[in-house]
Image: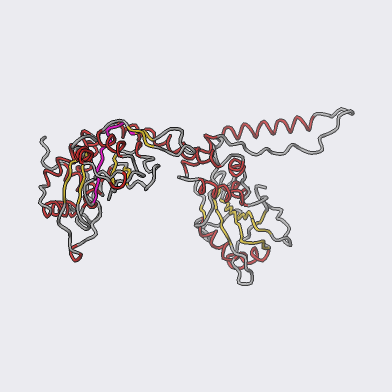
Amino acid sequence: MAEFKDEINCAKPRRSYLITYSQADLNKFPTRQSFAAAVCEVFTSERSKFRPQHWACCLENHADEGFHYHMALKLTGPKKWLECKRALKRKHGVVVNFSDHDGYYTAYRYISKSDENVYHSPNHPNLDEVGSPQTKNCQRTYRQRRANRQAATLTTTPQHDEEPESNPPTKKMKKLSNIDVSEFIHRHDIRDQTSFLAVANAQQEEGKKDLANYALSRSAKSLDELIQQTWRMKKAAAVLHRQKTSRMEIIREAAAGNCVEDCEGLWLRCAEEVLVNNKLHPILFAAAVRDLLMLGRGKYRNVMIVGPTNCGKTFLFKPLALLFDTFSNPAADKYAWVGADKAEIIWLNDFRWTRELIEWKSLLLLLEGDRVNLPAPKNHFAMDVCVHTDIPIFATSKDIIKYRGLYNAEDKSEDDMMASRWKVFRFTHSIPEREQRQITPCPHCFAKLVLLGEIS
């Protein structure tokens, strides 16, 4: 098949072709893209509703001298090739050969075997091999052994009582291992099962079925676990490094960096203005945030801002989510705290306490810094959520949290216990609508605010 002198039946339309331009004139087609464009042009006929769907083109050195162009082409429907061959001869003075490679994938695999710079059409499907490709030495050894076996078979005279094999053994489909698929997932940045199945289906439609066979032979749960485990494994070293980095080291790294685009210190100036308008000194606010980040949750350390709407409460804490892995805004049910134990920061934005959200006693323990177990759905989790680290807790609310028992009964002693667990900053200045602005959260500016007044 190296020269493709025997072309396929021109009367039978096909959807996929392998096109070869032997001894290519590089003055006419200096690049792979230029040759592919000429082929696509003759296949794009106004008389036919079928057009090129995707293609790939390679440039290959001839064994003696010169170059070949090979192009794998897939059309949107079956189409005959003879008219296109004549059009190329008429328009460009070149003669190409058409051959059938049993589907697009096999043609694509053929053209990409020796050219590392195959040119792909913009909408080309992902047909990368899964697993480590064989080395050239392995391929050469395999071919040599196969040739030796064939030669031995031809020179051996079969016995009269032996019958030759009527059907040669079929080539087995490549069996993929979990590590083969995991490397493929990482190489192509596949983050969820839907993306993985889409790639597997695209490859199957082109005749490459090993990945689809792997997907169909496993449950949805096992595929999800493989994808998640792949990324956990790839990120493990970074996670370990992050765990060894203190929260204040993260703050100092951000302070040594740069502002987000178009900020240039604007966020910091606005934050200081918000604090001053609420009669709070920026250094005092910074000291409270700094103590919480250094020491973690505990009595008189958890930081809460209370006040009316449009006073900048949320604005001051938004950069936390860009600096740390933040758990925020629990849903209003008893399973709301799933994920809080894995986060670096808890930010309860616009927090309203209800018994359905968290038991009063559990909330007191959480804020005090004690170990606390919170419910998790047992159909997905084997154990409850257990918060046992010194994770800092920030909050905003319209007012301080107060106890409400049965029939809305009040209890001053419970309110006092809750008050002892917060460092409360009360905002009173509501920003007029005409003065409100959309300011992009800036981790660099927030870090500089936190470090205000720090004694070196």
Pinpoint residue 63: horizontal percent, then vertical percent. Answer: 59, 44
The figure's colour scheme reads secondary structure
Q: Is residue 395 magenta?
A: yes
Q: Which residues are magenta?
A: 387-397
Q: Is residue 329 placed above or below 232 in the rendered structure?
A: below
- Does residue 37 appear left or right of residue 365 in this picture? right
Q: Is residue 357 magenta?
A: no
Of the pair 257 and 417, the residue shown nearer to us: 417
Of the pair 323 and 315, the residue shown nearer to us: 315
Of the pair 162 and 288, the residue shown nearer to us: 288
Residue lying at the far bottom in this picture: please name it: 47
Residue 330 in view in this figure: yes
Of the pair 384 and 3, the residue shown nearer to us: 384
- Does residue 116 appear left or right of residue 205 in this picture? left
Total marks placed: 0
Name the quadrant containing residue 24: bottom right
Q: Quadrant of the C terminus?
A: top left
Pinpoint residue 394: horizontal percent, then vertical percent. Answer: 24, 43
Q: Could you tell me which residue is drawn at 71 percent across and 53 percent down?
A: 6
Pinpoint residue 445: horizontal percent, then vertical percent. Answer: 19, 48
Pinpoint residue 396: horizontal percent, then vertical percent. Answer: 24, 48
Residue 61 in view in this figure: no
